[in-house]
């Protein structure tokens, strides 16, 4: 019995060994096959492919991410132009994102020289004169994707090939820089979405090279941007629409944003362009619903544009004017009344009296041009002599609007404007009705 058991054990051991050997051989063969497939996939042949075939391979990779590896492996090494697989994958992935809004890809076409020139000119116009020109990329052939039914004809989806050393190649530098720009603006949107103030500061700080942008101003700008997106941007990031994807310009449309009035939903565009020094700049301007601004004396509200005041009320605040000018009635039957005091000038629309004086008028503009006594300010925090950096702490985005702050009341639209001296200190502030012209 014992002998039979030992014999059975030996037989089972031999069978197990045989099974293990077969498994090991199968695993070895399977490994070899995988390695061979990988080598085959990425072992580029030496014969150049034609321009048409190169464009087809890229189009195929854009059409379906499952085709990316096969397309890349089918391009000879010399026609990759040094483009890595990771860059090729991401470049096609981004173009696929952009292409998905158009429809089903059915073909492609090459732009003519005239069409390419217009494409460059349009791109340069959108990016602005401070951006790197598309003309800096030479020898490009632009390929446009064609769809069974194109649902976004105003923003063609295009990629670039390049003619180099007697062959058509992937435009490696063009694609790499386009991907880099895309990554930058994507990171910008993520920092805003995550309410990451510190991360957003690191993105916008390189754009703000002037010494007026002290650290507290950069923080204020980042906070202002995050608050704007929280309060007024209704579209989630996944719904932002990529409209332009170039090394010099990346443009997104945000479909749903509440306008400054708070009553309407509008779309808005955010652009990233690459400046001539290589630094990225993101144009993300918006109009905030401005709050009404009051003229203050010694920090206390005293006057508001659009309100009517009597001559007696004005005298109680300022005394007798240094200069008083009353122009004859204009075509609205109103007189222009200008009063100058110590550091302040007031403009009214009213009616003149028979003796050439005035009794009351609607305040349409206020100038502060000096630190008089009592001290004049707007809202108790805007004053002549303040530095431009201090102004940016009050209105973080006012540099985006030419240092003009606008607000609306039932009586009209008003603008707050600033003039600066050579040291970037405020030398004059004007608050006035937009429709009223003064010098």
Image (tube, grey):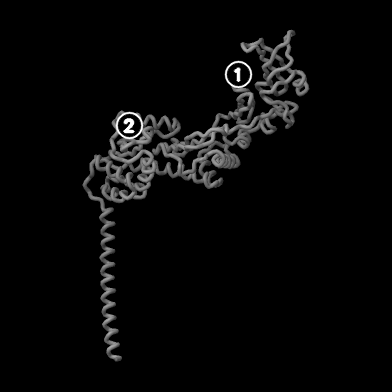
Element carrying mark 1? loop
Relative to the observer, which residue lies in front, 241 or 1?
Answer: 1
Disc number for residue 178: none
Residue 310 appears anywhere in the view: yes
Q: Residue furthest left?
A: 47
Q: Is residue 42 left or right of residue 322?
A: left
| Marks 2 and 1, how far apart at CA | 46 Å
Element carrying mark 2? helix
Where is residue 318? Give x, y as percent: 75, 22
Q: Which residue is mark 1?
A: 437
Q: Is residue 347 above or below residue 213?
A: above
Q: Which residue is mark 2?
A: 116
Res 158 → quadrant: top left
Q: Is residue 273 above or below residue 191?
A: above
- Say whether marks 2 and 1 touch (CB < 8 Å): no
Where is residue 332? Give x, y as percent: 63, 13
Residue 218 appears anywhere in the view: no
Decide: few, some or many residues near mark 2? Use Cα within 10 Å; few <14, some 14-19, many ≥20: some
Quarter of the picture containing the C terminus is: top right
Decide: few, some or many residues near mark 1? Use Cα within 10 Å; few <14, some 14-19, many ≥20: few
Q: Is residue 298 left or right of residue 398?
A: right
Relative to the observer, which residue lies in front, 362 or 322?
Answer: 362
């Amino acid at each position: 019995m014992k002998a039979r058991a030992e014999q059975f054990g030996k037989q089972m051991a031999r069978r197990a060994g045989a099974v293990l050997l077969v498994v090991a051989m199968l695993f070895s063969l399977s490994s070899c096959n995988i390695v061979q497939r990988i080598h085959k996939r990425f072992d580029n042949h030496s014969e150049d492919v034609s321009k048409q075939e190169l464009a087809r391979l890229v189009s195929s990779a854009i059409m379906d991410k499952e085709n990316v590896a096969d397309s890349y492996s089918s391009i000879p090494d010399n026609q990759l132009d040094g483009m890595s697989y990771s860059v090729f994958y991401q470049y096609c992935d981004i173009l696929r994102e952009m292409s998905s809004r158009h429809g089903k890809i059915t073909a492609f076409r090459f732009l003519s020289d005239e069409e390419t020139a217009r494409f460059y000119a349009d791109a340069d116009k959108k990016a602005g004169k401070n951006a790197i020109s598309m003309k800096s990329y030479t020898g490009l052939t632009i390929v446009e994707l064609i769809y069974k039914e194109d649902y976004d004809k105003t923003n063609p989806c295009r990629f670039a090939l390049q003619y180099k050393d007697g062959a058509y190649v992937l435009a490696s530098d063009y694609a790499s820089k386009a991907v880099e720009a895309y990554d930058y603006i994507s990171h910008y949107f993520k920092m805003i979405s995550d309410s990451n103030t510190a991360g957003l500061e690191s993105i916008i700080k390189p754009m703000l090279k002037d010494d007026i942008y002290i650290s507290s101003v950069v923080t204020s700008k980042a906070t202002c941007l995050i608050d704007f997106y929280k309060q007024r941007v209704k579209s989630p990031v996944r719904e932002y629409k990529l409209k332009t994807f170039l090394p010099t310009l990346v443009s997104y449309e945000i479909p749903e944003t509440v306008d400054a009035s708070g009553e309407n939903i509008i779309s808005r565009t955010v652009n990233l362009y690459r400046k001539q020094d290589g630094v990225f700049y993101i144009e993300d301007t918006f109009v905030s619903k401005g709050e009404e601004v009051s003229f203050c004396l010694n920090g206390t509200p005293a006057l508001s544009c659009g309100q009517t005041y009597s001559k007696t009320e004005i005298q109680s605040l300022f005394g007798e004017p240094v200069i008083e000018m009353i122009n004859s009635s204009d075509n609205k039957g109103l007189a222009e009344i200008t009063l100058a005091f110590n550091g302040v000038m007031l403009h009214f629309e009213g009616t003149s009296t028979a003796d050439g004086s005035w009794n009351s008028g609607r305040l349409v503009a206020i100038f502060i041009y000096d630190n008089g006594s009592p001290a004049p300010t707007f809202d108790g925090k805007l004053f002549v002599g303040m530095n431009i950096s201090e102004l940016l702490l009050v209105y973080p985005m006012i540099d985006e609007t030419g240092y003009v702050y606008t607000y609306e009341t039932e009586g009209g639209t008003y603008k707050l404007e600033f003039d600066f001296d050579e040291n970037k200190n405020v030398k004059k502030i004007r608050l006035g009705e937009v429709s009223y012209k003064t010098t």
